[in-house]
Image (cartoon, helix red, strand yellow):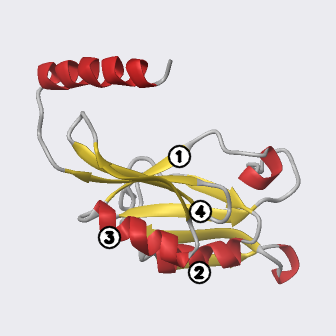
Amino acid sequence: MSKVNPVPPGFHTMTPSLAVHDAKAAIEFYKKAFGAELRFFMPGPGGQGVAHSELKIGDSILFLNDEFPGECSAKSPKTLGGTTQSVTLYVEDCDALHKQAVAAGAQGSMEPADMFWGDRMSQVVDPFGHIWAIMTHKEDLTEQQIAERSAEFWKSFAATHQ
């Protein structure tokens, strides 16, 4: 018997999994907003809802399912009244994908801007309550450069948020 790879083909070591209300609608949104490709779909009990789906965005996989009652089900942002995490998506063009996501129905929560650590970043909240940080890496910086820029950023932040 041949040895099976512990990480399935096409996956990375870590795979995010999101629970939402109306996963079928979320799948369609992620296709429009982020160019997601549906790789696998498993309907919920009695053919209702989504028990499990796999979406490919760029070179990564995202698990997505409806929130189901029970101890092993993650809660959706709608149930929680917010979310405890965000998904970071590195792309070729942060500005273009931000516009695409907003046009698809996401709420822009941070316009694209250059960040002190060398990335251009924006944020959107999808219609299901999940936060997406959209980033394009622009500069390779040393830890020292990031520390210097960070200190300047927080100094400026403190001066404008008193």
* Residue 105 position in % (x across, y down): 58, 73
- Give whichever of discs 1 and 3 has the lower sequence position: 1
Q: CA distance from mark 2 to mark 3?
A: 19 Å
Kindly state the secondary structure of the residue where label 4 is placed. loop
User: Foreground mark, 1 or 4?
Assistant: 4
Amino acid found under the numbered disc labelled 1: Ser
Q: Which residue is mark 2?
A: 28
| Above or below for 141 versus 121 | above
User: Foreground mark, 3 or 4?
Assistant: 3
Disc sitting over residue 144 in the figure: none
Q: Which residue is mark 1?
A: 86
Kindly state the secondary structure of the residue where label 2 is placed. helix
Query: Badge 2, how many Cα within 10 Å: few under 14, some, many 20+?
Result: some
- Give whichever of discs 3 and 4 has the lower sequence position: 3
Q: CA distance from mark 3 to mark 4?
A: 16 Å
* Residue 107 position in % (x across, y down): 57, 62
